[in-house]
Every structure is written in structure tokens, then in C-alpha cells.
Amino acid sequence: MRDRSFKIYRIFYPLSWVYGSVVAFRNKLFDWKKLPSKSFDVPIICIGNLSVGGTGKTPHTEYLVELLQKQYSLAVLSRGYKRKTKGYLLADAKSTAAMIGDEPYQICKKYPNVRVAVDENRCNGVDKLLELNHPPVEVILLDDAFQHRYVKAGLNILLTDYNRLFCDDLILPAGRLRESSSGKRRAQIVIVTKCPNDLKPIDYNIIAKRLNLFPYQQLYFSSFHYDTLKAVFPNSLENSKFEELTLSQIKEKDVLLVTGIASPKPLVKLLNENVRNLDVLSFDDHHDFTIQDMRLIKQRFEKLDIKQRIIVTTEKDVTRLQEHPGLDKNLKAYIYMQPIKVKILQNQQNSFNQQIKGYVRENSRNSCIFEVKNAY
């Protein structure tokens, strides 16, 4: 059963109406071509949502990276939320989370053969990426750009949280929507994310009816698969500690969970069901950890069982914790991260993969060249 206990702030209805009217007028300007949407001669896939954070954009972007990277030269373009720099930056070995943002940095470290760039001006970012050679960029993934309509993506993937469907939500500040649910019409694919693995067929049908999609839209459901815990500082481990830990290996442990993500509930639930004692230290999404935060982490950790204790955090939080000057070196041997992978449900993974690959294949430059050659 879905958790629909999220807050709606009815007192802000008037402000939501004003904000929603402004956003709706902006969208109309794009629809009427009063504001320009630029197309590019390369497949561009946009992964976004209608709400403010927490739908799993980064894990789904990584799913597409793993799906396409062996066959195509990929680039991921993001605005680099909360980075300390401005303008276009192409990530390299010297890049940090502060320079390009935590999520782009995470992708860049995991997939060294994929170009990762940031630019608040997405059109400029795409232009810059298309100037690259050796090899030239063949596919661009736009991270969190559903509202950035200056770039006309060829394929729009819209994510919505299973526990907070966009059809049940309201526009900011009464709810968490950036625009009204009517914005769904711009998507060719809608994915309901963070679903439980035991979702029943009737639940799929109920959600599909609630979302009320258009005939040209394809609906998928996905869940998170939590992989083996991995040591963040393997060189700091003692002989008695492991570089990886399965859920069965932490059943008798005390765990301090440290998160700075939009929606830690699924991870909290997972650990609650699999550890002896769980203490949760939760910060805001993309939280910039301070020296005081580092002291608090140490204080909370030292209250746990000295013989059976670890710290668990997320991949995104690792990007901001790993190089933090205030992190106590004595804690490093105890810190593990929880990787997340996306699983497409309802035996639709092959269908989803083929839809993505089919779009890229039909719109790639090589495909156009091949068609021209065959015409003669």
C-alpha cells in the first residue's frame, strides 16, 4: 500500500495559484513558439520530473548510461545543482563535487569513459559537447531538464514517486510540484519509481488509471535494488573488516545512517529491517556538510556498540563526505556506502531497453548517413 502521508499546505493555496499561473504562461510561450526550443542533430534523452527532487533521477540516468555506453559515445549534461562554479565545465580527473555538483561528480567517478558536463545554459552545454572529438558525442543524457524547454529533447522520460504521484500533488508552495500535472503531456515515457517489489497487478492498474496518460505515452514501473555495501575508505580497513558487506552480515550491527538526500525513507526502511539498531542522522538534499556536522556524526557514532558498529551513507553523500577536511580519520574504517540500482518491473525491462535503443538508433547521425547512402 502506498504511503500517502505527505504534507499538503493548504494555507499556501493562493501562492500556489499565482506561481502555477506564471509557470503555465511560460509553458504557453514555448507552445506558441514565442520562446525558442532548439533542436540538435543528435539523440537527446531528458530525465526529469514535475516535482522538487526525490524521484530517483540519478539512478535512472545511470541505468541509461549502463544501457548505452558500450555502443555509443555518451555525454551527461546537468546544471550542477549547488556547485561553487558558473558556466560550462567539462569534468576531468581534477574535478570535485564542489566544482561540478555532487550528482554529476558521482556519475563522472563511476563511469570514466562517459563525458560529464555542467552548464546552467543547457543549449550552450549541448553546443560545447557537440564540439568534442576523439570520439565525437553520439548521445546526450539531460539530467533534470524537464522544465528547461530551451533544449528540445527527442525523448522525454518523466519520473514520479510511487508514494507521491504527481496526480496527487499540488504546485509549490502548497505541494512539491514545479508545474501542474498537465505538464506530463510533454513526456513520451513515464516511470513510477521506488515501487515495492511485491506490487500486485491491481495496483499497477489503479496507478495507471490515476495517472491518466495519453495514448502516445508508455508507462513503466521501477524499484530500487540495494547492492552490497562498499567500504568508502578501503585503505583504512583493519584486517578484521571487509571491503564489502551484505545485508546478512550487518544483522547484528549498530548502524548510524547519514544522509543528505531528498527521500531517505526507502533506505531507512531497508536498514530497519536488517540491522540490530539504527540511528538516523538526516540532512536536507545536497546538504553542504559543515565542521559541526562532522562533530555530530562522530558523537552519534560513539554512542553505538563499540564492537559492532558502522556508518552507512549514500553514493551521493559520499561525494561530499569523502574529501571533507573535518571528517575524523578514525571514522574512515567504519564508513560504508549503499549503492542503488534501478530495476524495471512487470517483466518490462526488455521492452523499456528496446524503446530507448530504438530511439537512439533511429535518430543517430550514423543512422542518417546510412539512410542517405542507401538512397543512392
Image: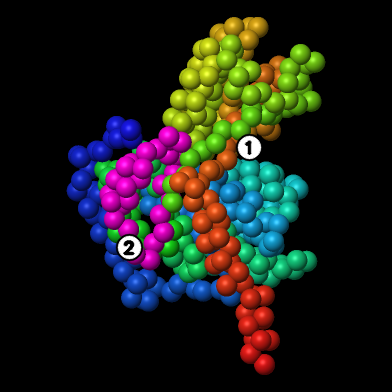
Q: 10 Å neighbourhood of mark 2: few (<14), some, or many (≥20)?
A: few
Of helix, strand and loop, which one carries label 1? helix
The quarter of the picture where residue 330 lies is top right
Q: Is residue 204 magenta?
A: yes
Q: What residue is at 46 percent from the left and 57 percent from the top?
A: 157
Q: 10 Å neighbourhood of mark 1: few (<14), some, or many (≥20)?
A: many
Instruction: Estimate the x, y position of residue 10 in percent, counting from the top left.
Output: 20, 40
Task: Name the residue beneath numbered marker 1.
Answer: 319
Three-letter code, disc 1: Thr
Of helix, strand and loop, which one carries label 2? loop
Instruction: Estimate the x, y position of residue 333 in percent, counting from the top left.
Output: 71, 20
**Residue 82 makes an appearance in the image:** no
Q: Which residue, as the protein is rendered here, is positioned at the far bottom? A: 376
**Residue 353 makes an appearance in the image:** yes
Q: How many marks?
A: 2
Q: What residue is at 53 percent from the left and 12 percent from the top?
A: 276
Quick one: label 2 or label 1, which is nearer the N terminus?
2
Q: Which residues are magenta?
A: 191-219
Q: Is residue 343 magenta?
A: no
Task: Name the residue beneath numbered marker 2.
Answer: 214
Three-letter code, disc 2: Phe
Q: Is residue 196 left or right of 84 when viewed as pictured?
A: left
Front residue of 246 and 157: 246
